[in-house]
Image (tube, grey):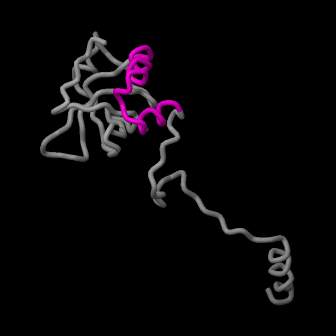
């Protein structure tokens, strides 16, 4: 590998979801979920790096903000396999990488667009409600 990780300021992470505007929700090697901002060096036209869901990346931690990190490097497929083989990343990231995005937080967010609950109504209850309304009552 050609990238040397500075363990004081940098950490491995997994891209959980792309949020747009050069931001992504990432799961850090320590198990913390944060918002990652893609650095300008990765966005330049001549050296553009495509970040996708399920990528293993390196993030730079901020001293003044724990909930935001900067994405500074992306590993390719061979480098990811080498990281996993050498046990350089945690089991949490390895499980997320192999399950390709099935990571879910312990709590379900009810304000999430994908969280919908339906009441279960049996057929008997549905027919009983229809019998209560008569045409003469309307």
Write the residue at 42% across / 24% down: 84
Range covered by the magenta-colored residues: 76-98
Give the residue furthest to the front.
Answer: 86
Quarter residue 44 falls in: top left
In the displayed structure, would residue 82 be above or below residue 16?
above
Provide residue 34's location: percent of width, then percent of height.
Answer: 31, 43
Question: Would residue 46 be found to the left or right of residue 116 on screen?
Answer: left
Indicate yes or no whether the magenta region holds residue 77.
Answer: yes
The number of callouts visible is: 0
Write the residue at 32% across / 46% down: 32
Quarter of the image with the N terminus is top left
Q: Of 52 and 107, which appears nearest the observer?
A: 107
Write the residue at 31% across / 41% down: 30
Indicate yes or no whether the magenta region holds residue 86.
Answer: yes
Q: Of 138 and 23, which appears nearest the observer?
A: 23
Provide residue 14's location: percent of width, then percent of height.
Answer: 39, 33
């Amino acid at each position: 590998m050609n990238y040397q990780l500075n363990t004081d300021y940098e950490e491995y992470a997994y891209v959980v979801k792309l949020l747009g505007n050069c931001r992504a929700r990432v799961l850090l090697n320590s198990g913390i979920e944060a918002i990652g901002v893609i650095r300008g060096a990765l966005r330049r036209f001549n050296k553009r790096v495509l970040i996708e869901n399920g990528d293993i990346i390196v993030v730079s931690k901020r001293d003044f903000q724990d909930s935001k990190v900067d994405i500074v490097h992306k590993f390719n497929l061979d480098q990811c396999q080498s990281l996993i083989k050498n046990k350089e990343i945690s089991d949490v990231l390895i499980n997320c990488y192999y399950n390709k995005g099935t990571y879910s937080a312990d709590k379900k967010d009810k304000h999430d667009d994908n969280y919908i609950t339906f009441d279960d109504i049996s057929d008997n209850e549905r027919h009983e409600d229809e019998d209560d309304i008569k045409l003469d009552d309307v």
